[in-house]
Amino acid sequence: MDAWWVILVSLCVGYLMTAIFKHRSPLSTAKRSIPPGPTHIPIISSILWLRKSFSELEPILRTLRAKYGPIITLRIGSHPYIFISDRSLAHRALIHHASVFSHRPKDIPTGIFFNNNQLNISSTSYGPTWRTLRRNLTSEMLHPSRVISFSGTRRWVLQTLLTRLKSDSQSNPSVLVIDHFRYAMFCLLVFMCFGETPDDATIADIERVQRQVLVGYNRFSILGFWPTVTRVLFRKRWQEFLGLKKDKEDVLLPLVRAMKQKQKQKQKQTTSNYDAVSYVDTLLDLQLPEEKRKLDEVEVMTLCSEFLDGGTDTTSTALQWIMANLVKYPHAQERLMEEIRQVVGEREEREVKEDDLHKLSYLKAVVLEGLRRHPPGHFVLPHVVSEDVVLNDYLVPKNGTVNFMVAEMGVDPKVWEDPLAFKPERFLSDEGFDITGTKEIKMMPFGVGRRICPGYNLALLHLEYFVANLVLNFEWKVPEGRDVDLSEKQEFTVVMKNPLHVHISPRI
């Protein structure tokens, strides 16, 4: 009888202690559910969601938000896929729980092929290798002193762009500008990456292979699911995919090898006239911390490809959106031109110099407003949580994939008055606006937290510099019989469905 009594008391005490500790734990997940979402039908639901691109998912998610709230779960594959559209929840996740939300999901096989087993800054797992790669980029290429060293290259690219636009405008009353913008950005980023002024044929080849990969990524993604099956069902697409991969290597690897050879020759010389340090130079000297080895040439090529993608397509897309709004709203273009006149004055050289940019507050407002209304990416790259975490009283389970609805946050009526309008002046009253979202997220075109785009300052510099000089040198108008259509289309970035055509005339 005494023994049973001891057992009974022990069980009661154990149960009581468990209940107390569960009650006291602020992150207890035992009785919490994952965020709500539509009914999940095993296999069928996953196939339905996987067939949709992000642009097709976005209106569906808006509808689901009205029903379920700002944090929604879709069942895609074996793990929940959680979408967050609320800026406060995004801040809590990416700032307050930064380390938990800093991981990336394992890429699908086709992505692994292109990313060389995810050995790049955007997709590699959070840890020593990621920190080494990111630190190298930020300290060696994005440090203010290094950015200044490429000011001459930016000036050369600007003059090339202005010459091409002027020539095109003389023979065509309506100029398609996006091709000129992409060419200019490729010239700039290729020089920064490989340290040489590229010829037109090289630029064309690099642009071709990079664009093919970016635009075709969604089309090839289906190959990554059940590869043994898709190799049979989609044999021709697999051949196309592998051919594209080889084409990319044939274009980029010779550039890496040439720079490697130059570096060897430079090391043998006591003096060198080689001034500009390219991104390839920094990668050839880099050592991976865990494997204690240098990068091989394919790994260097993969990081170069990421560098080119990060600075060309996104920047040229944002530049087109900004100029489209300045064409559609001439009063904004005229106000910007008046500010530029006040800063540049009667200077003979028709250039807004980089040193002038900090004086142009309305220019900065125009760029920020363009990024708010038309972020090149409407979602960030997916995050994966490394442990269970509670958001808004819901469980975000370990290994769950999380994404953030960037475009929705940028038009939140609780933050932005008349959110769909293009009003740069809204940023003039908020001169301390923080694009990094560290204190508060109002918009996040570059992401937020530890995985924020490391090149956001360089992107802002390029946008301000090129927008200012395009407006200084040309008057931008809607061509006769045309209109500026701000409809969107999903490619790698969210681009104009009908690309911008303009009538441009040199300013006297």
Image (tube, rainbow, N blue to C red):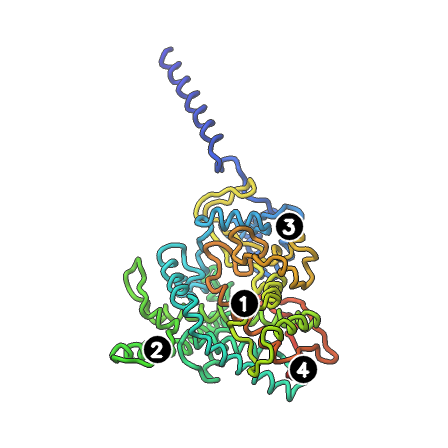
Q: Visible in this render: residue 86? A: yes
Label 2's element?
Answer: helix
Amino acid type assigned to the residue bearing label 2 in the image? Met
Would residue 92 appear left or right of 134 to someone viewing this image?
Answer: right
* Residue at the top extreme of this rendering: 1
Q: Earlier in the sequence, mark 3 or mark 1?
A: 3
> Is there CB contact under 8 Å for labels 3 and 1?
no
Q: Residues within 10 Å of mark 1 (few under 14, many from 20)?
A: few
Quarter assignment of residue 473 = bottom right
Give the labeled residue for mark 1.
Answer: 358
> Is there CB contact under 8 Å for labels 4 and 3?
no
Estimate the spatial distance between the alpha carbons at disc 2 and disc 3, rounded to whole Å.
Answer: 51 Å
Q: Visible in this render: residue 44? A: no
Q: Earlier in the sequence, mark 4 or mark 1?
A: 4
Estimate the spatial distance between the alpha carbons at disc 4 and disc 1, rounded to whole Å.
Answer: 33 Å
Q: Could you say where residue 199 lies in the image, as x and y percent from the top left? A: 45, 84
Near-viewer residue (428 or 271):
428
Label 4's element?
Answer: loop
Which residue appears at 69% of the width and 70% of the height?
A: 485
Which residue appears at 31% of the width and 69% of the height?
A: 285
Give the labeled residue for mark 2.
Answer: 259
* Residue at the bottom extreme of this rendering: 171
Give the labeled residue for mark 4.
Answer: 174
Estimate the spatial distance between the alpha carbons at disc 2 and disc 1, rounded to whole Å.
Answer: 35 Å
Amino acid type assigned to the residue bearing label 1 in the image? His
Give the labeled residue for mark 3.
Answer: 64
